[in-house]
Amino acid sequence: MSGIGRIHSIETFGTVDGPGIRFIVFTQGCPLRCLYCHNPDCRNAHDGKEVTVDYLINEIKKCKSYLRKGGVTVSGGEPLMQPEFTREIFDRCHQLGLHTALDTSGYCGLEIAKPVLEMTDLVLLDIKSYIPELYYKVTNVSIEPTLAMAKYLSEIDKPTWIRFVLVPHLTDNIENVEKLADFIATLKNVERLEVLPFHKMGEYKWEQLGLGYELKDTPPASAEQVQQIVDIFRDRGIEAIGAIAL
């Protein structure tokens, strides 16, 4: 049933997941297994709590007065694992005159995603790497669906922000970054690119879940490292910024 979905949590005053102040819905379930995931408790699609779209809209209405220059972001987990649920949230938000943003890895069949994208004002597309072998090492899935999604978003001229997490000794491979920059430079719809410095704030969740955290000895990305990567994107004419850590 489209009116019911599973969520991990909500945030009523988000400032980093799209423009302005935002109400954020974190959906439950994710097909990726990112080494640096800071919400591993979102992975299992059967966990979290079941809620109705009506419930979420009522919560959003309570915050509507300060969302006027912001809106509603559906994040995760991976929202496209619950496409009907996500689409209905966005449809109802549009009825309220609210801006909608979809935070996604793009790991989804396009035909499943298209109805959601019709109701999406802005896509926050996380591209974890570019070299296929490295992308698989980081996420445990193929990069191809994400690249297909990125190309489709460009074809339909859907406003998109790209997000890239900079992990020292993992995603900071210069060839990897340059190839990603070359690819993004071919897209006509990218409004900005955020380089997000790796941190270990989610490590405790891995421990609580009894999961091995492979990056426990990886240092956080420094401001200098972030700036070096930002410059690679800017050299291709991409509006890149060093954002706060994810």
Image (cartoon, grey):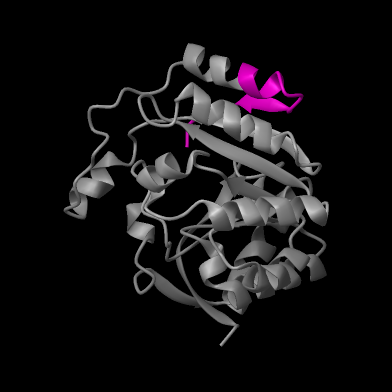
Q: Position of residue 192 (x, y in %)?
A: 72, 34
Q: Quadrant of residue 135?
A: top left
Out of 201 and 116, give the one closest to the viewer. 116
Out of 226 and 201, give the one closest to the viewer. 226
Work out whether 49 lies above or below 134: below
Which residue corresponds to the image point at 82% horizontal and 62% vertical from the top-left?
A: 97
Which residue corresponds to the image point at 73% horizontal and 28% vertical from the top-left?
A: 238
Q: Which residues are magenta?
A: 231-246
| Farthest bottom residue in view | 1
Out of 152 and 17, give the one closest to the viewer. 152
| Farthest left residue in view | 210
Taking the magenta stretch, the answer to whether it contains residue 245 is: yes
Q: Position of residue 203 (x, y in %)?
A: 27, 40
Taking the magenta stretch, the answer to whether it contains residue 167 is: no
Q: Tell me the quadrant of the picture where the N terminus can be found.
A: bottom right
108 horizontally vs 237: left or right: left
Work out whether 79 lies above or below 171: below
Out of 1 and 146, give the one closest to the viewer. 146
